[in-house]
Image: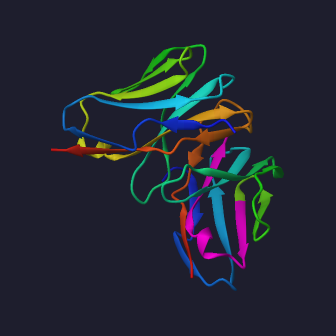
Amino acid sequence: GESVGLHLPTLSVQEGDNSIINCAYSNSASDYFIWYKQESGKGPQFIIDIRSNMDKRQGQRVTVLLNKTVKHLSLQIAATQPGDSAVYFCAELERTALIFGKGTTLSVSS
Amino acid sequence: ETGVTQTPRHLVMGMTNKKSLKCEQHLGHNAMYWYKQSAKKPLELMFVYSLEERVENNSVPSRFSPECPNSSHLFLHLHTLQPEDSALYLCASSQVWGGSYGYTFGSGTRLTVV
């Protein structure tokens, strides 16, 4: 079946750098995407979402970009902090349920 | 706290035991979900309940039995599990089923089958 996937399983950055986490999806009919953050011992936490009629959406220190032509989603984190260390998942709404990718582990060093 | 509470946080059970996982949401949401999270695998959708009715069952073995007595509570009854069922079981809720809304997750129950 079609699924959402991430390009890299791990990403290591220095505190203060900008981070970019990528995700490729295969279902061109998907019209809603979400990024989640999961810290150790916790459930996934909503970060930001975007609908397919947009190509960019900004939140506090985070930006999601959607490129429907190549079916690519990215999460940009500005001025990455140690507290941003976590696993990041993208998810797409496929028919009636969220389908998740495997996740990228972001490690931030001071 | 996210508004979705799962108990217990940790559970160790033998393969012949029967146990239940509980999920409670205080968000006024109408849809609730069970996901399984295994190491190095994406979250797998198990069951979906909308307005207390089961609307999806993703080919989950019958040793997992969900129950939704009301829109605020969701249970996952477990019996004769296998070691490969060891995982983090996550409950989530959303305002409506199928709508473009984010899910709110609980912290999960870490299940170990011995």
Q: Residue B42: where, in percent of width, then height?
A: 55, 49
* Image vertical order of residue A1 relative to residue B44, above or below: above
Residue A69 shown in magenta:
no
Q: Quadrant of residue A50?
A: top right
Please state which of residues A23 and A109 is positioned toward the viewer in this rendering. Answer: A23
The type of colouring in the image is rainbow
Residue lying at 43% horizontally and 35% vertically, measured from the top left: A7
Q: Using the rendered view, name the quadrant where residue B91 is placed.
A: bottom right
Q: Nearer the viewer, residue B89 or B75?
A: B89
What segment is highlighted magenta in the picture?
B74-94
Foreground residue among A62 and A103: A103
User: Which of the two residues, A74 or B9, is positioned nearer the viewer here?
Assistant: A74
In which quarter of the view is residue B46 placed? bottom right
Query: Is most of the magenta stretch helix, strand or loop?
Result: strand
Q: Position of residue B114 (x, y in %)?
A: 57, 82
Work out which quarter of the rendered image holds the C terminus of chain A and state it: top left
